[in-house]
Image (cartoon, rainbow, N blue to C red):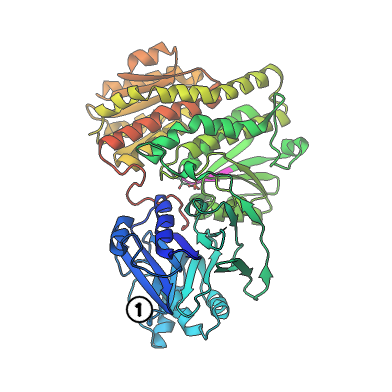
């Protein structure tokens, strides 16, 4: 989704802003632009396509003079990606510039009203109305004009604003979309996320909804729409800039896959104390946990797949009623929620619009909401009752890998906590599960070290047209994620099926040579999956088996087989997903795809 960067300080603004925008590239975009204030005028440069085009146009920003400005990477929603629709947008005289992330929902009505007052529009975007509205209200007092505009626009947005005649300030405001403030030494930044400012400062502030930020060289002032000043705490970001760089790897995705042992260890370790699971963030007593009636897992995409996994684990281990929902369905299906239900929302970015809406709905229904989130200070983290962070560090590749693995860990811990509180997990069983958890980082490392084998297999399927992933129970959840990874980065059509469903229709799609990845990590289901493998082989499919070491029959029946170290079957997803991530990665690389920034996708989906 769109990215915003703003800068005011003593340095030339444009190169700093371009560098920040580069760090937001991973969010996904199709055009970019920048506005800089200099000697009472605003200069704007925009270019369609990758940031290199904007670099080229402005010679790395050096042709734009001035020490304050705003920049934007646009992921098209209203109007095709072109130079005119790219942000910043300005008023007719070019004296007010605006960048926006999100959607102004009532822009059509506003545009008509402004047109009737003589304003002309050049772009198809919703954002341009903000520039003209500001123009309409601006009488030399920027704060007042912004407040009036906020009273008229509807939707979820983050805005960066600059006035030609206000050299001492740039402005930012957010409602439902992210915007952080970075505090440097004699310079201040705003950005859609911290990775854009980490190179300059780790001191950040998170403005609340509709709090207007006035940035100057000496810091920031926040105020409400009633012009009341607001104080927000300054946080020190723990992430290191190197965590947001490739560090010698060809792609962020490969680097992030390789980081998984560490991420899993870092996510586990704060919760293991004296052989017991501690989740301090979940401020619910064991007695209260035991009284929870139902747990809902609500999320989108890969995060939803961890929720599908969690359903199997919670039901089997904690004997608890569980529902797992896609956030985009949950919010429109009128679910029956009551105050004894716990709703767990799962999100890497903490900004996904549908997941945020689900959180809001659950809170309004009186449920307690636990968020499993990676980005500190994100909207979901702020709005939930409790937050369990995943310790994945910044995830830059659009396709999630390490955050997914970290989410699984938080969910295992949560399931075990519930199971203990409900009296289903103690003594030897608890001890053995704790031991298996502790072994996961090393076992993941082992899987990562066998990547050459996966690469060889991947090379055979670079030209595949359709790939099917099948599994039962948790293996079905793993298949969903394996399939999503492959299709999103390699653009190969791929589907995941609960293996038992194949013969109810899908098996008709199989042709001689179709690749079927068959996941079998659950001992109680091996025999069933073996039958499914035989069925697909009988129709000419080539089978890649992913199974636990020593499962000879599946190994023999598969054309290729990846074996996994032994673990508790409930944790198998953490191991089985590694070769499937690698398979997707190497196939995509072999096909020459832009692995880190797949077409049409955005890292953080801040619109419904
Ligand atoms: C796929 C992927 C997406 C996200 C989904 C939710 O690789 O990354 O499917 O999982 O968009 O995003 P978050 O977790 O930020 O809510």
Relative to the observer, which residue lies in front, 337 or 162? 162
Q: Residue at x 31, y 31 (%)?
A: 507
**x then y, percent, for residue 252:** 40, 40
Relative to the observer, which residue lies in front, 541 or 273? 273
**x then y, percent, for residue 2:** 42, 59
Along the horizontal axis of the image, is 413 left or right of 111?
right
Dominant secondary structure, magenta: strand
Q: Is residue 505 visible?
A: no
**x then y, percent, for residue 277:** 68, 30
Residue behind mark 1: 121
| Range covered by the magenta-colored residues | 297-301
Dot 1 crowding, Cα within 10 Å, few <14, some 14–19, many 20+: some
The image quarter in which residue 205 lies? bottom right
- The quadrant of the rendering that contains the N terminus is bottom left
Q: Is 299 a magenta residue? A: yes
Q: Is the residue 182 above or below the residue 419 in the image?
A: below
Q: Secondary structure at mark 1?
A: loop
Q: Residue at x 42, y 83 (%)?
A: 114
């Amino acid at each position: 989704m769109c990215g915003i960067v703003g800068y005011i300080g003593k340095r030339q603004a444009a190169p700093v802003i371009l560098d920040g925008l580069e760090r937001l590239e991973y969010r996904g975009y199709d055009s970019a632009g920048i506005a800089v204030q200099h000697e009472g005028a605003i200069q704007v440069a925009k270019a369609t396509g990758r940031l290199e085009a904007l670099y080229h146009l402005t010679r790395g920003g050096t042709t734009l003079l001035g020490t304050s400005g705003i920049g934007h990477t646009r992921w098209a929603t209203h109007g095709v990606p072109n130079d005119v629709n790219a942000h910043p947008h300005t008023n007719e005289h070019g004296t007010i510039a605006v960048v926006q992330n999100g959607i102004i929902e009532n822009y059509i009505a506003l545009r008509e009203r402004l047109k009737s007052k003589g304003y002309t529009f050049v772009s198809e975007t919703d954002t341009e109305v903000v520039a003209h509205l500001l123009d309409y209200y601006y009488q030399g007092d920027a704060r007042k004009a912004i407040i009036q505009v906020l009273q008229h626009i509807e939707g979820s947005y983050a805005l960066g604003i600059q006035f030609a005649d206000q050299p001492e300030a740039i402005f930012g405001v957010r409602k439902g979309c992210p915007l952080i403030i970075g505090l440097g030494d004699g310079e201040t930044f705003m950005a859609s996320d911290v990775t854009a400012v980490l190179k300059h400062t780790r001191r950040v502030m998170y403005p609340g909804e509709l709090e207007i930020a006035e940035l100057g060289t000496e810091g920031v002032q926040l105020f409400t729409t009633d012009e009341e000043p607001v104080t927000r705490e300054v946080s020190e970001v723990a992430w290191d800039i190197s965590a947001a760089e490739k560090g010698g790897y060809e792609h962020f995705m490969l680097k992030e896959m390789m980081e998984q042992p560490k991420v899993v260890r870092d996510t586990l370790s704060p919760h293991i104390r004296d052989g017991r699971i501690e989740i301090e963030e979940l401020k619910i007593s064991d007695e209260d946990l035991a009284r929870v009636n139902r747990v809902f897992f609500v999320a989108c995409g890969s995060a939803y797949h961890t929720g599908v996994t969690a359903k199997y684990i919670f039901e089997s281990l904690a004997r608890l009623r569980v529902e797992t929902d896609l956030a985009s369905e949950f919010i429109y299906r009128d679910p029956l929620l009551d105050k004894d239900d716990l709703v767990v929302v799962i999100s890497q970015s903490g900004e996904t619009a549908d997941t945020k809406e689900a959180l809001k709905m659950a809170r309004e229904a009186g449920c307690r909401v636990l968020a499993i989130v990676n980005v500190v200070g994100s909207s979901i983290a702020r709005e939930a009752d409790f937050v369990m962070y995943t310790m994945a560090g910044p995830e830059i590749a659009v396709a999630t890998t390490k955050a997914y693995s970290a989410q699984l860990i938080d969910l295992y811990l949560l399931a075990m906590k519930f199971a203990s509180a409900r009296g289903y997990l103690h003594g030897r069983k608890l001890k053995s599960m704790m031991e298996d958890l502790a072994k996961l980082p090393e076992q993941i490392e082992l899987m990562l070290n066998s990547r050459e084998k996966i690469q060889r297999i991947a090379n055979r399927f670079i030209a595949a047209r359709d790939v099917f992933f099948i599994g039962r129970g948790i293996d079905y959840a793993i298949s969903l994620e394996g399939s999503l990874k492959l299709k999103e980065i390699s653009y190969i059509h791929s589907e995941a099926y609960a293996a038992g469903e194949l013969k109810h229709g899908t098996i008709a799609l199989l042709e001689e040579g179709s690749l079927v990845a068959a996941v079998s990590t659950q001992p109680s289901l091996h025999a069933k999956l073996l039958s499914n493998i035989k069925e697909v082989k009988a129709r000419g499919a080539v089978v890649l088996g992913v199974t636990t070491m020593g499962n000879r029959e599946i190994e023999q029946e598969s054309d290729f087989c990846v074996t996994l170290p032994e673990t508790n079957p409930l944790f198998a997803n953490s191991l089985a997903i590694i070769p499937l991530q690698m398979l997707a990665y190497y196939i995509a690389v072999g096909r020459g795809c832009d692995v880190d920034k797949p077409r049409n996708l955005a890292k953080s989906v801040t619109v419904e």
